[in-house]
Amino acid sequence: MMAVAAIAVALQRNLFSAVVLAGIYSFLMATVLVALDAVDVAMTEASVGAGISTVLLLGALHLCGGEEAKPLARPWPPLAVALTIVAALVYGTLGLPAFSDPQAAPHTHVVPRYLEQGPKETGVPNVVTAVLASYRGYDTLGEVLVVFTAGIGVIALLRRARRRKEGKP
Amino acid sequence: MILEHLPALQVTVPLAAAPLIVLVRQSTVAWGVATAVSWFAFAAALLLATQVAGGGPVSYALGSWPPPWGIEYRVDALSAFVLVLVSGVAAVVAPFAWRSVAAELPRDRVYLFYALYCLCLAGLLGMTITGDAFNLFVFMEISSLASYVLIALGRHRRALLAAYQYLILGTIGATFYVIGVGLLYLMTGTLNLADMAARLPALAGTRPVLAALAFITVGVSLKLALFPLHLWLPNAYAYAPSAVTAFLAATATKVSVYILLRFYFGVFGARLVVGELPMPEILLALSILAIVTASLVALWQADLKRLLAYSSVAQIGYITLGVGMASRDGLTAAVVHLFNHGITKGALFLLVGGIALRAGRAGFERLQGLGQVMPLTSLGIVLAGLSLIGVPGTAGFISKWYLVLGAIEAERWWLAALVVATSLIAVAYVWRFVEAAYLAPPGAATPQPGEAPRAMLVPAWLLVAACIWFGLDTSFTVRGARSAALLLLGGAP
Amino acid sequence: MRREPVLRVVGKLLIPYMLLFALYVQFHGDFGPGGGFQAGVIAAAAVIFYALIFGLPAARRLVPETVVEAMVALGVLIYLGVGFAGLALGGNYLDYFVLDRDPVAGQHRGIFWVEVGVLVTVAGVMLKIFYVFAGRARPAGE
Amino acid sequence: MSVASHYSYWITVLLMTAGLYIVIARGNLVKKLIGLAIFQTSVYLLYIAPGKLIGGTAPIVAEAFKLYSNPLPHVLILTAIVVGVATLALGLAITVRVRETYGSIEEDEILAADRDDPDGA
């Protein structure tokens, strides 16, 4: 279903429906993530992908107008690029550990300590939170800074100047 | 005690400066904080470099969690070298920005500019210093997002489109990098680069590892504008505000080269990359294409800023050429050229920024007779241009010298000849400036006589002086680059 | 939309609960899914909801732009501050063990403040972006 | 190495292609950003799917469970989602500015406008 939604987005020329489809896609993604036990991620994807992103896109559409002008002139070269990448990925993934293989490297290295020691060392039973805020707290700091950068970037780009400057031709 | 925490402070102090600037909202204070912070970063980088030169790699566990469970900061000869370059350029560009930014940006956005400048600097430093693959991605995004905005703040409306294209390609690059890291993680179960390197030899040659190598190469190549993935660079450099162009040209692509080096030699290991795969050949071919085509395209540009931007693509080709040789001299050349080209291009773009302030833009029609109108600026451009060509006595010569040495050592005579021959194209495009500035009388579009303000000229000349200084006294650059090259070939990250 | 009584009443009723839910997500993050980021998004969504029902000027009165901009910066500073506190108390950067005599309690305290920082910045940024986009659409909204 | 054991990867690859195709092929700036978002989301699956263990539960430690899915990719992807939305917001902000200065968000129209009027109106 997600695949269908993604392809529908690709084919849709009305930007408004493309945005709505992208929102649906995000919700489907969130559902899949719940099935994969990633509840924290699913929650974020639902609120961010389906919520914030859609609101932002709709806001931008409101400012930009909503119909895509032209059908594709030459669809083949981009398709070729995309297919090359598929080939590389298929080649790469064939050697990966099989789905749900408990002996695969990600399950045997590094992570066991989080699961076994995490609650004791940090006093937090949600291991995702423990890893997020403590073991890899510095990544989260970086993440907050990315949000911060985007925030002040948007301010810098879109704030209405008090007076119109000649600096912007 | 401070010394022991330098690796963390190196990045977090510039990071902390950004929110402070946003809170204060005052452009003078913002400039002061940004300058102070960049000088602090420079001092910290120098101290770290001496520490590393004296006592080997420094490792710092953030949050006191031992790696690979926590995130590690790791400074060795190579990263210390890049840290010095990035923070040094930042320290020179910050004073320059004072007048340049005031002239090019609306006043109520100036403080935001400095906040973004600090973020961009911190992001680049964080990318260099980190020993963790995912942390690298996070900091890459900080610096990239900041630089997209910085470019979009340019005065010309094309700056917006340039920033947009850079955003799309940069994000694709970063996502490719994440895919590569993901594959590596699935195979090794770790994100720490050193730990990865230790666990990879057992898996060498398996398909996911090869695919990861491919994805990381393509992703990072997009960021470092390796031919043919350079399309975003000329527009971005040409339309960004002058201070931004100088800073990004001197640092951003260099940090990406550093990442490529780190992954090739520090993680995958020279044995896999050089020994079993045709990576060196691919790199050599692409580099040669980059050097030749970009140099030729540069010849036809009508604007000095664009000319220099295309020349950057060509010069990056020289760096990757050195990487592709994968020998001791080749890598030394790559690392030395990383540094030398950083300061040369920094100097050139700063001087062009001065011209842009006086003349509006840097189209060649406005440069007619500039030698009489702005004598110091023109002289600086010529001197730095000599370094770009690689004339003996300038920094550029040193890098080309090692490139030729590396080629001869590998008995690739044609490669040595090519390096010399392509330098002649550089002569041609630098000559175009000389011709306009000194041999033509001032035209209608030439600005009124008068130099750029001292606050802009002094930083620019500092870098010009550095181009000459590092051409004569090579002890810092070559020694640093040599130990970095040995470190890379030694296999240890 | 501004004269819809049903919406206004429902909005008035719901928004406090949305904020409450944000706080629940924030502090329950230790035990169930959730944390600063999600809570920040929900809190911002509550205010955006308010703006949609009562109009942008009303939302701007409720949460003024300057406050939002300060939030954006303050959250980051809280997070960085936790890191520097770790340094000041003799640990490494972002070391939570030293924040309390009992290391586990220290961890708890560190995680708590870090999540607060995330909440403040994320809510601030999301709101700010919304304000900026919406303000762009209706120039008279100032 | 059966095909069935890798089907989660196939889905990822398919989504990735669709996203990337939209980015490269489409000339509309907003559409490109949607494509970019899909491209990024597909990476989430690449990370998370292999972390799932059948019979495991979400990584919230409690007495009743013994087997948990891998929490580390979850953390990474949380960060990646945030980065994605930050990029999207910035990209849209730039698009809005482009629209205001050029009056269009179609790539070819903008390029044509630049050719006709290189100095910018």
Image: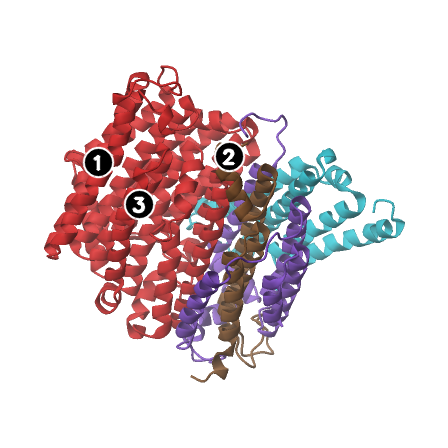
- The residue singled out by tag 2 in the image is D117
The quadrant the C terminus of chain B occupies is bottom left
- The residue singled out by tag 1 in the image is B427
Q: Label 3, secondary structure: give it.
A: helix
- Which three-letter amino acid code belongs to the residue tagged 2? Asp
What's the distance in space between the residues labelled 2 and 1, CA to CA? Answer: 32 Å
The chain painted purple is A
Residue at (15, 44) in percent of width and height:
B401
Q: Is residue C48 above or below residue B111?
A: below
Hue of chain C?
A: cyan
Q: Which of B298 and A35 is in front in this view?
A: B298
Q: Label 2, secondary structure: give it.
A: loop
Given contact means CB atoms under 8 Å apart, are the residues at marks 2 and 1 in contact?
A: no
Q: Label 1, secondary structure: give it.
A: helix
In the picture, the disc for residue B294 is 3
For the residues carrying marks 2 and 3, which lies nearer the camera in this image? 2
Whether residue A148 can be seen here: no
The chain painted brown is D
Q: Nearer the viewer, residue C121 or B116?
A: B116
- Which three-letter amino acid code belongs to the residue tagged 1? Val
